[in-house]
Image: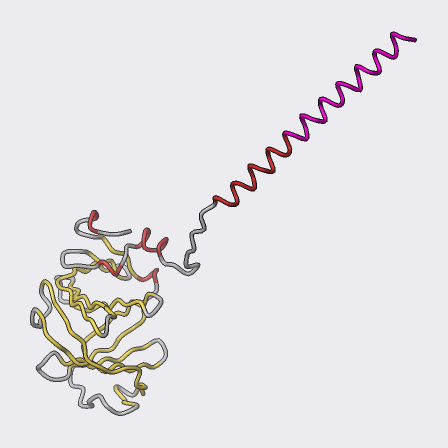
Amino acid sequence: MEFLLIIVVALLAIIAVVAIFNYLGNRKARQAEADALRNRTYRPGDPFSSADDDSVYGDPRQLKPGDLVELRGETYAVRGTVRLTQDGYTWTENFLDTGLGSKAWISVEDDPDLEVVLWHELSGVVVEPGPGTVEVDGRRYHSEEAGTARFTSAGTTGVAASGRMAYHDYQAGNERLSFEDYGSGWECARGELLTRADYRIFPSNPSDQNI
């Protein structure tokens, strides 16, 4: 009987020791979890950021003379870039050329989301900016924004190295119409809003690209 009592006491002691170790282990795990939550650094991010797309298609904000742009299967070279600034807000316009007679411009701005527009110059437009609506080639456009901006240019752009310009932008759905004056009178261009799938950028010096 005495031997049986000793066995029971020993078992109870073992159970007590195991319970203590389990308690201490769980307490340590809870403490570690609490410390991790306290020390975790919150890094807020824009859920609509285009950073992932930039890494795949290239960042149009970084376009510069010498880069290549593949636009719907056709390859263009960036011959020049105009950087414009108005009240601290900056956007760019890039002159594209295939070298085979096809020329265009791409404008790039964040307002607040990335907007890339493909522009083709129009000739023979007799209307001038100013009215709330204008009609060109049978399409009615509504005034969107007008103002003046300072600019600097690099490469071949057809404008001065720096100065001031005036603009008046119109819109009709996804179509754009822009009037710009760099000092020699109004010039008109029609624009088309591009999606990420429409273009891909190949920088002339990839190390310069912040992607």
Residue 137: quarter of image: bottom left
Q: Residue at x 21, y 48 (%)?
A: 206
- Total residue callouts: 0
11 versus 160 height, above or below: above
Q: Position of residue 78 (x, y in %)?
A: 16, 61
> How is the structure coloured here?
secondary structure
Asked if the stretch drawn in magenta spans residue 17, the answer is yes
> Left of 76 or right of it: where is 162?
left
Residue 80, located in which quarter of the rendered image? bottom left
- Residue at the far right in the pictured view: 1
Which residue is situated farthest in the bottom direction here? 131
Residue extent of the magenta highlight: 1-24
41 or 158, nearer to the observer:
41
Q: Is residue 5 magenta?
A: yes
Locate the N terminus by quadrant: top right
Front-most of 47 and 96?
Answer: 47
Out of 77 and 11, give the one closest to the viewer.
11
Q: Quadrant of residue 176?
A: bottom left
32 in relation to 177, above or below: above
Vertical position of residue 210 compared to residue 92: above or below = above
Q: Position of residue 185 (x, y in %)?
A: 11, 84
Position of 134 compared to 35: left or right?
Answer: left
Give how far across and how far down residue 18 sits, in percent. Answer: 71, 23
Task: State whether residue 100 is above or below residue 25.
Answer: below
Pick whichever, 2 or 190, lies toward us: 2
* Main SS class of the magenta portion in the image: helix
Residue lying at 75% horizontally and 23% vertically, measured from the top left: 16
Q: Position of residue 175 (x, y in %)?
A: 32, 77
